Amino acid sequence: MKDQNLKYPIGKFVKPLVISKEELEKWIEIIGTFPEALRNEIEPMADNLLDTPYREGGWTARQVIHHCADSHINAFIRFKLALTEDNPVIKPYNEALWAELIDSKFLPVKFSLSILKGLHHRWYVVLKNMDDEMLKRKYIHPEHGTKFTLEEAIGMYARHCNHHLAHIKLVNQNS
């Protein structure tokens, strides 16, 4: 059970039966402030800590940060597709294999922090300006065979931000 607490330090996403405006606003703010929260957490870290896994068998802090850039680039594209096409089928990717590529394992995190800062600003502007009809638009994830509404996806990605921020905090706490 301890390993599950390290793997999912804030638990898994549970979609509320009804997504309130307040909950949605909270999620949007998490997405909007994530790059700064991440930067604040890693700035004081020694570079060697970036190569420390948050749990045995888990990714290093460096891989987590690069993964966030990869994942959120894909998320932004999924949102744009859903906003401009009817029920698009999104392209999944193998995040575990992406995390093993040379850029994820060895590049300085400043490159992904830069991506996240610009990307999240653009994403935040889109999210803040979505109306109720836009929030109900959907995309299809072929691996899950599910249509996700954009309002649900906002919650999933807000949780994703907090989930990986918690992983970075674990590295700091255990150093």
Image (cartoon, helix red, strand yellow):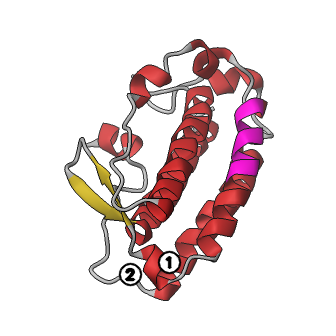
Please say whether residue 162 is visible from this viewpoint.
no
Q: Please give the range of residues in magenta.
A: 111-119
The residue lying at 80 percent from left, 40 percent from top is: 43
* Amino acid identity at mark 2: Ile
Label 2 residue SS: loop
Residue denoted by label 2: 19
Label 1 residue SS: helix
Question: Is residue 5 depicted above or below 61 in this figure?
Answer: below
The residue lying at 49 percent from left, 87 percent from top is: 21
Q: What percent of the width, then of the height, locates residue 84?
A: 49, 61
Disc 1 residue crowd, few under 14, some 14–19, many 20+, Cα 10 Å: some
Number of numbered discs present?
2
* Amino acid identity at mark 1: Leu
Q: Residue furthest top?
A: 102
The residue lying at 75 percent from left, 54 percent from top is: 36
Alpha carbons under labels 2 and 1: distance apart: 7 Å
115 part of magenta stretch? yes
53 part of magenta stretch? no
Q: What percent of the width, then of the height, locates residue 93?
A: 39, 32
The residue lying at 19 percent from left, 50 percent from top is: 145
Q: What percent of the width, then of the height, locates residue 18?
A: 32, 84
Residue denoted by label 1: 24
- Look at the numbered discs 2 and 1 and tell me whether their residues touch, using CB distance below 8 Å: yes
